[in-house]
Amino acid sequence: MNDLHLAGAFPGVSFADWQRAALKALRGGALGELNSALYEGIEAAPLYTAADGGEAARLSGQLGASPFIRGERRPATERPWSIIQFLDHLDIAEANRQLKEDIAGGAKCFWLQFGGQIPYGGATIGARRVETLEKVFSGVALDEIGILISGGFDAIAGTGLMAALVEKRGTPPARLKGSAGLDPLSLYAASGSVPAERERALSEAVDVATYLREKSYGWRPFLVSDRAWHQAGGSAREELAFSLAAAVAYWQALIDAGWPLDEAADAIGFSLTADTDIFVAIAKFRAMRALWARVTEAAGIKPRRAPLIAAMSFRAITERDPHVNLLRATAAAFGAGVGGADAVLLIPFNTRHGTPDAFARRLARNTQLVLQEEAYIGRVADAAGGSWYVESLTHQLAAAAWGEFRAVEATGGLLAALEAGLVERKLTDVLLRRSANLARNRDKITGVSSYPNLAEEPIFSRPEDLAIDLAALDEEGEVPQLPPAGKGKRFGAIVAAAANGATLKGLERACENLLERFDFIPPTADRTAEAFEQLRAASDRAMSRVRARPPIFLANLGALADYNARAGWAKNFFAAGGIEAFDEGGFTDLAKLTRAFQRSPAPSVCICASDKTLAAMPGVAAALKGAGAVAVYLAAEPSALAMLADADKRAIDRIVHDGCNMLKMLTELHHIMRVKELGEVESEEFDEDDDAAEPRSRS
């Protein structure tokens, strides 16, 4: 068996051999046509060699050494990364049960979701006082798990509640693990609200950090998150740059408050979004370590390895075909794990349908356990190291992010860059490119814009979510009076008030500042799939009211081989908008085709045929228009129009093909077929003959 050499049975292939084969496949095109433009402003080549990534691999250094691109070797007895779960159930007893179940199932860290007011996944915890928070953690030692507090407007109040619980229990603060989740700058950016007294923009967060330091808490005060930039459409380039700028701002604020350089640097951790592009995710985590090492070294201290948490992209989650979210979660965890994340948070697959149940939470855990224990992801340190593509991408991404970071710093720091509009301009540029690619289905969303299933069984929000009295949870109670921020005294008063029964809402009110409103960045609430899902929802409403989805008739011409490819494509195209295609096979007789169309319930029609068949059957589009078609579509490349007669060209309203504006076409068709109005009528009042769409006049 040792003499078996499988590679020796095949002839060697050189890079020149590959080039010749690629050029032959391109039929005269240039090799550059195979390059892919990334949103990061980087062009990815189809193949990399040592000439492309060899120098980058050398610059990546060694395991455990600056610039920490390669991460570090972990003990074989430890898991490669910690599994994070949301702790976010409204029902206290259920939250406690889920917590214990997750611990038994392998989770080591919990994202305590008090709210945050910005939708990034997860629900909210029902504990809003120390006494109810104590019930959530009943039977669980606080120093045996990691706790990450959601970084919203209630981050300080939530941290105050947790600190009061820690001190009530007598848990040694130094033994705690996790973070207070403070990240005020990204919160200001996402919410568009910033304290009118700018000197208070960071002072309260510094006050919290100072209290935690004096009390020797093991929690890192700051957790710099890139979620705001990611949700606003940014690429890894902007996410890294703006996160680095936020970290430097917090570091400087701590230094100004009298902290030593090294202690201030160690008070900051990072939470990076893991999207479904595995290679970009790997490079992103590696690049962040290099960037933080460079910043800390430039400040004159020993380079620091950035503590990195990975949080799955909420932008990528879909409401439709939610089980595909399991694949997205797997890709996110794989990229983050190979990239060297210290801990990973996955969003349960059905999070868009109410508070995730035990099954969804189990899959969020087990996805990571399978990758760790069966696929052995993370057992090899820097598994992507030496990949010429990953090495090249890591250093290109780090250099690009460094350039953006320097532009922010030249403006006066992140807050100044937000107010100057620099951040919004950078994010809007990427967002517009994303939106264009989404509309044209170049960025495909499986189960939504590609391979949608109109027969998909709906998933309803769980009724138990409705049994919780939200008004009672938001009880304000007495609003404590707090001293000004400084040396931890303000946060100390918050902890004391929490221990004396203050509610989360009351503490949040006590922390309120007079805010100014701005549009710092594009809206952060949208998911990528929402525009298509809104069309599907309108179709569902029509279905529930009039017992039928908006239909379109497929005018298939010729034999199956002549129309099948384009008919299949057209069904997928229209189903992405919730429009059901009626397929009655192929037609070679024009009269039979028009009669079949008129018998169908569809007011619109799409012609599907090969170019050869289109040329051989003139007059189809004109005949269908004359038969009453409100809109006539042609599924073909624009070049096919050259073989049509003028009468047919005039009869065709739209041509649909790969690369057309799919979203605009589907939205327009919804308007033509009055889908919204159909979803609003009472089913018993609907009369198909009276309410059929009127033929559209042509100008």
Image (cartoon, rainbow, N blue to C red):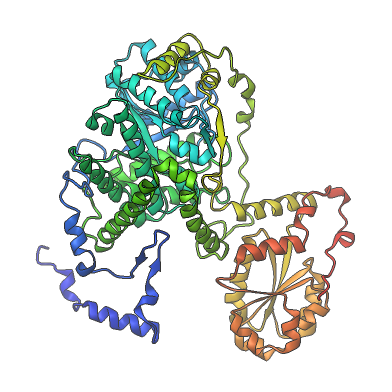
Residue projecting furthest to the left: 3
Identify the image quadrant of residue 99.
top left
Residue 333 visible in this rendered orientation of the protein: no
Q: Residue at x 20, y 69 (%)?
A: 51
Give x and y (percent) for residue 612: 61, 88
Q: Quadrant of the C terminus?
A: bottom right
User: In x, y percent, where is residue 319?
Assistant: 57, 47
In this rendering, is residue 289 above or below 137? below
141 left or right of 455 in image: left
- Vertically, is 472 above or below 576? above
Q: Who is closer to the viewer here, 432 or 351?
A: 432
x, y percent for residue 226: 41, 43
Q: Nearer the viewer, residue 270 or 579?
A: 270
Q: Is 603 displayed left or right of 144 in the figure? A: right
x, y percent for residue 211: 34, 19
Q: Quadrant of the N terminus?
A: bottom left
Does residue 460 appear to the left or right of 684 in the view shown? Answer: left
Residue shown at 57% from the left, 76% from the top: 565
Compared with 374, 550 (above or below) is below
Identity of the residue drawn at 43% across and 11% down? 496
Residue farthest toward the top in the current orientation of the protein: 500
Front one among 551 and 537: 537
**Nearer to us in this view, 129 or 268:** 268
Q: How many marks?
A: 0
In the image, is residue 402 above or below residue 412? below
Q: Can see residue 617?
A: yes
- For this orientation, the residue located farthest to the right is 690
Q: Residue at x 24, y 29 (%)?
A: 263
